[in-house]
Image: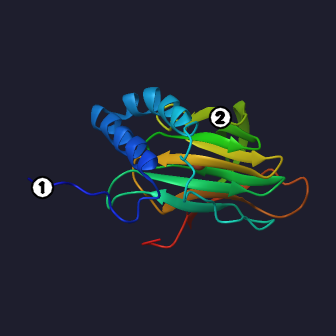
Amino acid sequence: MSRQTAPESDPNPLVREVYDELGELLQEGDDAFIEKGPARLADAIEQDGFFENVTTDPAAPDEYTREKVIGDPGEHVIRFMEWPPEYTLMPHEHHGRPCFEVLVDGHLTLSNLERTEVGDGEYAFDVVDSEVTDPGEPAVVDPRKNEIHAVYSPVRSRSLHVYPSDNWRAFGYVPKDDTPDNDVYERREFTLREPGD
Ligand SMILES: [Fe+2]
């Protein structure tokens, strides 16, 4: 009889357990993943020992970090983000598939945005809605409903994010110029991490 052993890279068995359950939800489909996954992860992080060997990469004042917690090759991934105080992650798009986060500490504001093309490859944004999460609360990003969003952390914050696949390229929007009243952005492709990280 063969016995499956957890990969050595697993931080602890509680993380593996919720990771595998999230994989089963993904097998059911993206709707099941975002309907049931956030509550499942929020419950999991309440368990004693969940954060054993689960840490963030400390964030410098000007950049958030995305430490991988667990992710089998070619499968979904859980990442542990750390956000510096008063940090804005500029408007960006995902890859057509939903994802979610559960806040661990601090506060995060997630704003859904609508873009208007105001020039060749230039856009302005309106906020459709905003959601502020407290520790233990989840938030869902569903590009099937709204593609573009931005994130703001008023204080140093940490959050767990679950993505159906571990993409490393994304499209984001950068300010056209750095004047204080600039509200025009240009669309760019950017790298979330190095391949293989
Ligand atoms: Fe995002």
- Residue 119: tell me if it is visible: no
Q: Which mark is residue 136?
A: 2
Q: Residue at x 83, y 46 (%)?
A: 154
Q: Residue at x 77, y 48 (%)?
A: 153
> Between residues 91 and 164, which one lies in front from this camera angle?
164
Say whether disc 1 or disc 2 marks the residue closer to the N-terminus. Answer: 1
Please state the horizontal and vertical placement of residue 11, each as a whole percent of the image. Answer: 47, 58
Please state the horizontal and vertical placement of residue 134, each as a whole percent of the image. Answer: 73, 34
Please state the horizontal and vertical placement of residue 142, each as a whole percent of the image. Answer: 51, 35
152 left or right of 112?
A: right
> Between residues 59 and 181, which one lies in front from this camera angle?
59
> Between residues 186 and 13, which one lies in front from this camera angle?
13
Q: Is residue 126 above or below residue 4?
A: above
11 left or right of 148?
A: left
Please state the horizontal and vertical placement of residue 41, each as a whole percent of the image. Answer: 51, 37
- Residue 6: tell me if it is visible: yes
> Between residues 187 and 98, which one lies in front from this camera angle?
98
Describe the element under mark 1 as helix, strand or loop: loop
Q: Which residue is mark 1?
A: 2
Describe the element under mark 2 as helix, strand or loop: loop
> What type is the residue that disc 1 sits on?
Ser
- Farthest residue to the left: give it: 1
Q: Residues within 10 Å of mark 1 (few under 14, many from 20)?
A: few
